[in-house]
Amino acid sequence: MKQALALFAIIVVFLNSCSQYAAPIGGKKDTLAPVLVVSTPINKQKNFKGKTIEVFFNEYIRVENANQKILITPEPEAPFKVKIKPTSLRLSFDKPFKDSTTYTFNFTDAVKDVTENNPALSLKLVFSTGSSIDSLRVGGKVIDIQTGQPTLNTLVGLYIPNDTLTPTKSKPYYFTRTDTSGVFLLENVKDGRYKLFAFDDKNLNFILNPNTEKVAFLKGDLDLKANNDTLNLQLFSFYNTPPRSVRTQQMVNTYTYVFDRGIEKYSIRFNNAEDSIPSYFRTPTELTFFNAKATSDTIRVKISVTDSLKNTTELTQKFKFRTSTRRETPEPVTITAKPADNGDSDRNLEVVLEFSKPMKQITPDSLVLFSDSTNRIPLTQQDYRWENNQTRFVLTKSTTARNNLILRLGRGAFISALNDSTARTELNYTIRDPEKYGVLTGRVNTSAKQFIVELLDENFKLVEKQLNNPTYRFVNIKPGRYRLRVIIDENGNGRWDSGNVTENRLPEPIFFFTRNKGLIPIKANFDINEDIDAF
């Protein structure tokens, strides 16, 4: 047997001496991946002292992005040079490998055949520079905390604990990447204590960039004395720097600061109270001031902004609106209604009007509500309220309507801070027929006292939520496919809070309904009961 193997190796080496080769033409389609025939060193070899790794295959090969796709753990002290021959791949290192260390070479899908690009997916080479080979393994699964879906190509790394360890500056000692199911496996790991981190590693540099890459971690050390392949990690977004203004936009009627991320809350303080003008976030990243006083003077202001992770920036700014010799036509006021026109509503109407700029005045007589097309319903100041710096108008009114409701906004019903007004608008709503909608009820199995139950559409967009209700009930759900998500609201603030790597704080836990691939079909005139575990 040994003589036959030696003869085959000689043949492989002879083939490699040929400088030209070509893929065969015609015949059946090749569906087989290259097979490893022999390697230097051989798999599981001990006391290896060389600086060159070479693997031989049973057919012609091609190699893609060897420096990126071939994962070597622990990482060698020096980079390697790649030489590709017709049926072999050679990796040459400038420095010797570390003494008494087990190395794992994972070739992922770097090696393929030349005819059909069939990858050699399970190709690994393990050897030791000492007298023993480490044999422990660490594995598990990585999901996105917001969706519960597995993540692909996420870097999972083990780090040697020390006082200065941070994944934003240090590379992992052992590492691997997740597959399409989010599963990862680190093999031939030495026993000991480790820190475990996982992150997107979008730029493939093995260093966490918290402002652009999601991260997951174990809060304490991983004390590895036996195999552990049941670890579950949840990737979350984490900024470790305060928000910053990345650009501005100067107009005659508006001045906008654009930030590098979404802002959750802000405050404005003008140096001169007489300079006070309206402002609000038109989008989560855009703070706009409105030239309500038609001034061309310089305005000095202090802006404080805080993102969802409680990172805060204090900005001392001065700005002025653009002057123009020709009149600038202001953007017209736009209204976004929820529910939208021609939507449906309960008899107890709630309409939210979002304006594209702050309003300063309302003409109550120009707001008229009709039930069943002809019955006028009187509106008073107690029926509405303003929110978000006079940019959100919320109208609530109980009615006895049977068929429909009509809300008419006369021309000029609302006047903006820039003195332009809204156009005539009519919103028509059909009273919901319960038989055309579904109901979803169930229990939340959790020991937590404070939690949020969220109904999502199948694309993870929030539809409705309830707080601290162990027997949830969602009604008037349009037929379709939905998801359930439970957030453990540990601090009781009514929303999800992310984690912080530098403070060793995990995000608030999130749990998903997972049966039937996580999807709940809702049908008209049907009550569906689904319990969800949140522990």
Image (cartoon, helix red, strand yellow):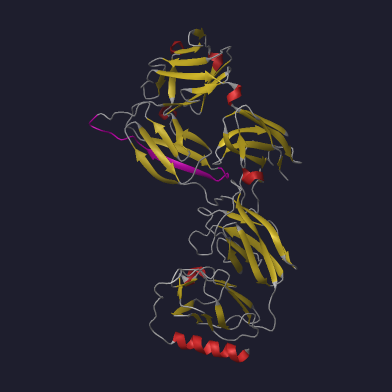
Q: Residue placed at 61% from the left, 85% from the top?
A: 48
Q: Is residue 54 magenta?
A: no
Residue 207 to residue 235: above or below = below
From the viewer's perspective, tell me whether residue 231 is left or right of residue 106.
Answer: right
Residue 326 to residue 412: above or below = below
Residue farthest to the right?
447
Residue 111 horizontal/vertical position (percent): 49, 72
Q: Nearer the viewer, residue 468 or 494?
A: 468
Count the numbered circles shown.
0
Residue 131 horizontal/vertical position (percent): 69, 84
Residue farthest to the left?
325
Residue 474 to residue 203: above or below = above
Rendered image quadrant of residue 174: bottom right
Q: Residue placed at 46% from the left, 35% from the top?
A: 281
Q: Nearer the viewer, residue 142 or 97?
A: 142
Q: Is residue 313 magenta?
A: yes
Quarter of the picture containing the N terminus is bottom right
Quarter of the picture containing the C terminus is top right
Q: Nearer the viewer, residue 217 or 106?
A: 106
Let me know if residue 244 appears in the view: yes
What span is in magenta? 308-326
Q: Nearer the viewer, residue 207 or 297?
A: 207
Residue 410 horizontal/vertical position (percent): 40, 14
